[in-house]
């Protein structure tokens, strides 16, 4: 029995790791392409960067930013566990925190928004790739709720159509609505799993 449990845990861990890794790759690719789209000259700046400048990036992260990351992680955890699925929960926590990797171009001094990937365009980009690779509709819902919660915690002060339009923002009065939708959607995912696992056994 212990051996079976170990195999299941290993499979869950590897799937979670794969999703998180793929998410980071997609985030970096989207951020890079957005930076180049907003200014083709930025490409030359990127390739002229020195290792010292990149390595020193953590020093530019303020204490407030660390606290924001902690807040995203904690609330992402509570959002993820509503799904009653370890893979979805782990992915939600990491995607909630790692979304802010898109701050890097701004930290480097590039003339782009700090939250360049906090965009519905990025949301759809990830959905398309995830569905193409996994055909898992629940994963798309979980990713969407994670994204919505993240931008809500940023008070919706994000370029929601980046990189094509940088000025429009969602009215801040909708923060509460967005948070409710994020948690409610994941609750529905978890309730469906609860019925599948527990109620059908009865």
Image: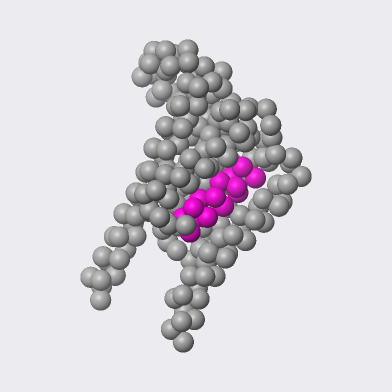
**Total numbered circles:** 0
62 to 85, vertically: above or below: above
Considering every residue shown, the one lying at the far right of the view is 173
Residue drawn at 56 percent across, 18 percent down:
111
Residues in magenta? 138-152
Colour convention of the picture: one colour
Report x, y in % for residue 85: 45, 63
Residue 9 falls in which quadrant of the image?
bottom left
Task: Please provide percent x and percent y for residue 20.
Answer: 40, 47
Residue shown at 41% from the left, 23% from the top: 54
Q: Is residue 123 visible?
A: yes
**Image location of residue 88, percent across then percent down:** 45, 57
Residue 106 located left or right of residue 26: right
Query: Considering the image in quadrants, where does the N terminus appear?
Result: bottom left
Looking at the image, the residue that sits furthest to the left is: 3
The residue under the point 50% across, 73% down is 194
- Residue 178: x percent and y percent? 67, 50
Which secondary structure class fits the magenta region best?
Answer: helix
Report the front residue among 83 and 127.
Answer: 127
* Position above or below: 128 against 48: below
Residue nearer the viewer, 44 or 64 = 44
Tell me what residue is drawn at x 56 percent, y 46 percent: 147
Residue 42 is a magenta residue: no
State which quadrant residue 27 falls in: top left
- The correct choice, above or below, for 182 with respect to 101 in the image is below
Q: Is residue 114 visible?
A: no
Membership of 148 in magenta stretch: yes
């Amino acid at each position: 029995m212990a051996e079976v449990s170990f195999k299941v845990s290993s499979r869950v861990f590897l799937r979670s790791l794969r999703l998180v890794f793929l998410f980071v790759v997609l985030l970096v690719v989207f951020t890079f392409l957005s930076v180049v789209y907003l200014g083709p000259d930025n490409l030359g700046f990127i390739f002229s960067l020195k290792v010292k400048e990149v390595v020193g990036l953590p020093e530019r992260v303020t204490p407030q930013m660390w606290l924001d990351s902690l807040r995203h992680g904690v609330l992402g955890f509570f959002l993820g566990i509503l799904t009653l699925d370890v893979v979805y929960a782990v992915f939600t926590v990491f995607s909630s925190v790692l979304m802010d990797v898109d701050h890097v171009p701004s930290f480097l001094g590039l003339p782009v928004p700090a939250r360049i990937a906090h965009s519905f365009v990025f949301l759809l980009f990830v959905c398309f790739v995830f569905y193409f690779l996994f055909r898992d509709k629940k994963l798309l819902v979980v990713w969407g709720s994670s994204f919505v919660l993240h931008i809500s915690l940023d008070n919706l002060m994000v370029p929601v159509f980046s990189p094509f339009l940088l000025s429009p923002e969602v009215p801040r009065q909708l923060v509460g609505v967005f948070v409710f939708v994020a948690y409610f959607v994941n609750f529905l995912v978890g309730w469906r799993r609860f019925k599948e696992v527990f109620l059908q056994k009865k």
